Amino acid sequence: MSLLASLHSFLTLLYHKIHIHSESPEWVVFIHGAGGSSAIWFKQIRAFREVFNVLLLDLRGHGGSRDHVSVKKPYSLQSVCDDVFEVMDHRKIERAHFIGVSLGTVLMRSMLKDRSGRIQSMVMAGAITHLNPWARLLIVLGNAFKHIVPFRALYASFAFIIMPGPKAKESRAIFRREARKVSPAEFRRWLTLTAEIQSKIPGWRTDAGLTPTLYAMGAHDYIFLPPAKELAETFSNVSITVLRGCGHVCNVEQPELFNDIAIGFIQGQGFTRQDDADPADVRSARSGDHIRGKIIE
């Protein structure tokens, strides 16, 4: 790559890192949530790079992409998703498996509309599939106080409501740490996406597409677990695994189990830790069956 091309990539692409596997042709792309960064996946990198090629990136305005040129463009779900595909194009990644957490799962679901051919499968940790009254209240409060309450105080309050309890302490700490890298203006830009998200989610709940999808949900994810269970019981391409002892960010709170479940799902052969689940209850997404309310300790 020429110096000019390298400079152009540095200026126009999201900050990202890749890990190349010497043998596997499969790619896994990790999508973090709002206010976070690719650092949220630090407990996944080693396990996944031993099996797949890995792409980690920071969304516009977050982490290493804090000053990315895209922050000056209009914000929409499509434009944020386009940022991701531009990195994939640059790295010549035609298709990939996607893993997201929290709002990252919303972006992945948005990608299915126009780019479903580039998504081989999806693993959604803390999947946001419906906004119940609590979630809608958080959005209303965020928009009402975004110019009054300091951003970090507001974000810390949201984090505690979504991730309550002592077991989520590490997850909250990570989100607060990464939130320090996000400017108040960036927080307000992402809040503008909430109206579009609220308008699209009802349609997504009636059409899950055809892509094999796994919801990895914490048993204490009281806001987002119930609607995720409903979808897993409705669509043949959607499965769900509920992990005891953790909440919204289950990839941080139960990393080893999450890694095994996600890797097994992507490989299309169910779970890799058969001692954790009855084989009769384990299904491959490719079979079109469900994991209905499967709970794993």
Image: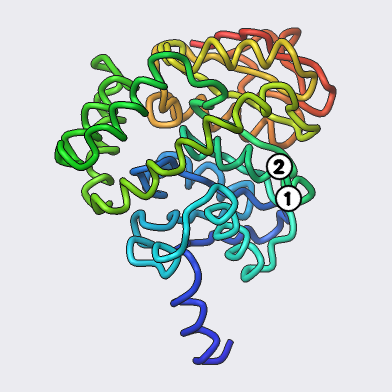
Task: Indicate which disc residue 166 carries.
Answer: none
Question: Which three-letter amino acid code belongs to the residue tagged 1?
Answer: Arg
Q: Is residue 82 above or below residue 138?
A: below
Q: Is residue 293 above or below residue 124?
A: above
> Which residue is rendered at x = 67% and y = 31% of the image?
264
Which of the pair 81/91 is nearer the observer? 81
Residue 7 in picture, x, y percent from top left: 46, 84
Q: Which residue is mark 1?
A: 115
Which of the pair 153/43 is nearer the observer? 153
Return the residue found at the far bottom: 3
Residue 31 in picture, x, y percent from top left: 51, 45
> Which residue is rendered at x = 57% and y = 53% of the image?
54
Picture quarter containing residue 69?
bottom left
Q: Which residue is mark 2?
A: 112
Question: Which three-letter amino acid code belongs to the residue tagged 2?
Answer: Leu
Report if the CB atoms under discs 1 and 2 are less than 8 Å apart: yes
Q: Is residue 228 above or below residue 38?
A: above
Q: Quadrant of the N terminus?
A: bottom right
> Which residue is rendered at x = 44% and y = 77% of the image?
11
Q: Neighbour class for label 2 at 10 Å: few (<14), some, many (≥20)?
A: some
Residue 119 in picture, x, y percent from top left: 72, 46
Q: Neighbour class for label 1 at 10 Å: few (<14), some, many (≥20)?
A: some
Residue 134 in picture, x, y percent from top left: 38, 15
Secondary structure found at label 1: helix
Picture quarter containing residue 290?
top right
Which of the pair 99/127 is nearer the observer? 127
Secondary structure found at label 2: helix
Which of the pair 219/151 is nearer the observer? 151
Return the residue found at the far right: 287
* Mark-to-mark CA distance, 1 and 2: 5 Å
